Image (tube, coloured by chain):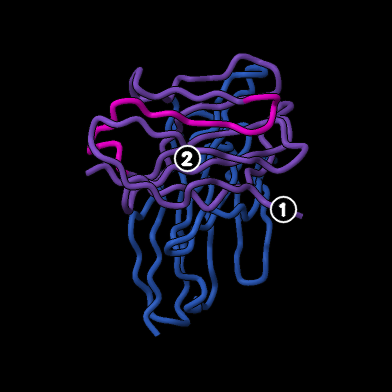
Chain colours: A blue, B purple
Amino acid sequence: GQQVMQIPQYQHVQEGEDFTTYCNSSTTLSNIQWYKQRPGGHPVFLIQLVKSGEVKKQKRLTFQFGEAKKNSSLHITATQTTDVGTYFCAGDWVYSGAGSYQLTFGKGTKLSVIP
Amino acid sequence: GAGVSQSPSNKVTEKGKDVELRCDPISGHTALYWYRQSLGQGLEFLIYFQGNSAPDKSGLPSDRFSAERTGGSVSTLTIQRTQQEDSAVYLCASSLEARGGYYEQYFGPGTRLTVT
């Protein structure tokens, strides 16, 4: 089946440093979603990107969708301890109709922030 | 409003026993998903229900796993003859009906299953 590769698997940063996680697909994505899972918690939806080259911002978080719609990134500026958690991307290739699941989650990037 | 709820929150069972995990999706959400997450790992897709369509069971790891969704709402994931490798957190999510793409998924708190 289709896969999304997410790197890095782990990232340790000093508080105040920037952080970026990348999500890549070998084939063109229809859209991509990003989720955050705090330690001991469940994934929470952050954003969905649909358009080629799309850039969306949420405060210190910047999400990008590549021009070819094969990759995406999440960048956090000036990390804070509240940013700790695992960030997942989830890619959707082609909607093939009701009843067919096509959304695939990456393995996630676990972010640790050192105060 | 109420989010996705799951019960029990924790379940410890002996190897070989059957278990049932319950998920109550958000009212009005026609799509429901089950995932499995082992310690420190990503999300493993198990099964997907979409409205009245036949569920997509392509992610179920073996025939010991089954799920049903009654009345288009509550779902039950059943694991028969549990094995130690079944130990994981089982997450349920729901979303609005997917038309031409996927709406954001709302996850429940999960059921932590431990098979001894």
Residue at image coords 38%, 70%: A112
Position in image of residue A51 (x %, y %): 70, 41
Query: What is the crowding at mark 2: few (fewer than 14 residues within 10 Å), some, or many (at least 20)?
Result: many
Q: Is residue B21 rendered to the left or right of residue A92?
A: left
View extreme (top): residue: B54
Q: Which residue is mark 1?
A: B2
- Read off the magenta span: B70-87
Identify the chain of the residue marked 2, using the numbered disc in the image.
Answer: A
Query: What is the crowding at mark 1: few (fewer than 14 residues within 10 Å), some, or many (at least 20)?
Result: few
Circle on res. A105: 2
Q: Is residue B97 rendered to the left or right of residue B11?
A: right
Up the image or down, A64 lies above or below B69; here it is below
Residue at image coords 32%, 47%: B12
Q: Nearer the viewer, residue A52 or A19?
A: A19
Position in image of residue B11 (x %, y %): 38, 47
Up the image or down, A15 lies above or below A101; here it is below
Residue at image coords 44%, 42%: B90
The amino acid pointed to by label 2 is Phe
The amino acid pointed to by label 1 is Ala
Task: Give the tally of numbered discs.
Answer: 2
Position in image of residue B2 (x %, y %): 72, 53
Q: Quadrant of the C terminus of chain A?
A: bottom left
Numbered disc 2: secondary structure: strand
